[in-house]
Amino acid sequence: MRTFSLRDLDSDFVDEIESLDFIGTFRDCYACGTCTGGCPVHRVNNDYDPLRIMRMLVLGLREELLKGEMIWLCSDCYTCQENCPMEVKITDIINHLKNLATHEDNTPLGVSTQKKLLMDQGKIYIIDEFDNKKRAKAGLPSLPEMAEEARKLLNKR
Ligand code: SF4
Ligand code: SF4
C-alpha cells in the first residue's frame, strides 16, 4: 500500500468538490468501516476500499484519486451508500470523482473504449450481421447501426 507525503495534499480540491451538497457528506464519516465491510468489490480485491476513498478526500489527495485506478473499480452497486450510518453519499461521490477524472481524460482504457463505442454507435457492443441473423432466428427484429433514440440523445444527425 502506498504512503503519502504532505506534498500530495491539495486543500483546494476539498473546496472545489464541496460546492456540491452531497459531496460534503464525506465529512460526516467516522470511519466505522461498514461501507468497506459490505462492499462486494472489496471482498474479492482488498486493495479496493471505499472508506479509504473517503479518507483520501478528507486529505485532499486529488492526484491520487483522479489519476489512480481505485475509483474505477467501484461497480456502482450502492450497497455502501445504503448501509452508511452517517448517510454519506459514498457511491454518488465516487461517481462524481469518475466524472471529474473523465473531464481530465483520466479514464482507464476499457472505459474510454466503451465511451468511443457509445459515441460512434449508441451502444457499447458492436451489433453486426451475425448478431442480427441470430436475432432473426429468435424472432427478434434486426438492430440498426445506431438507434434513433440514441442518435437524439447523443445529438447526432
Ligand atoms: S459506512 Fe459511512 S461512516 Fe462508516 S466508514 Fe463508510 S462512509 Fe464512513
Ligand atoms: S457502490 Fe462501489 S464502493 Fe459502494 S459497495 Fe458498491 S462497489 Fe463498493
Image (cartoon, rainbow, N blue to C red):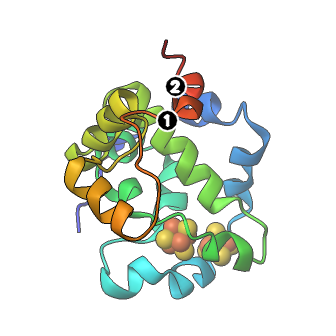
Task: Classify residue 22 as left or right of residue 66.
Answer: right
Q: CA distance from mark 1 to mark 2?
A: 6 Å
Q: Which percent across, then down, holds residue 139?
A: 45, 66
Depth order, front residue of 76/7: 76
Task: Classify residue 109 as left or right of residue 92.
Answer: left
From what the image shows, is residue 1 above or below residue 11? Answer: below
Residue type indicated by callout 2: Arg
Q: Look at mark 2 in the image and give the residue it sits on.
A: 151
Q: Look at mark 1 in the image and give the residue it sits on.
A: 147
Residue 38 picture quarter: bottom right
| Tags 1 and 2 touching, CB below 8 Å | yes
Q: Which percent across, then down, holds residue 157?
A: 49, 12
Q: Is residue 39 visible?
A: yes
Depth order, front residue of 9/47: 47
From what the image shows, is residue 36 above or below residue 143? Answer: below
Residue 46 picture quarter: bottom left
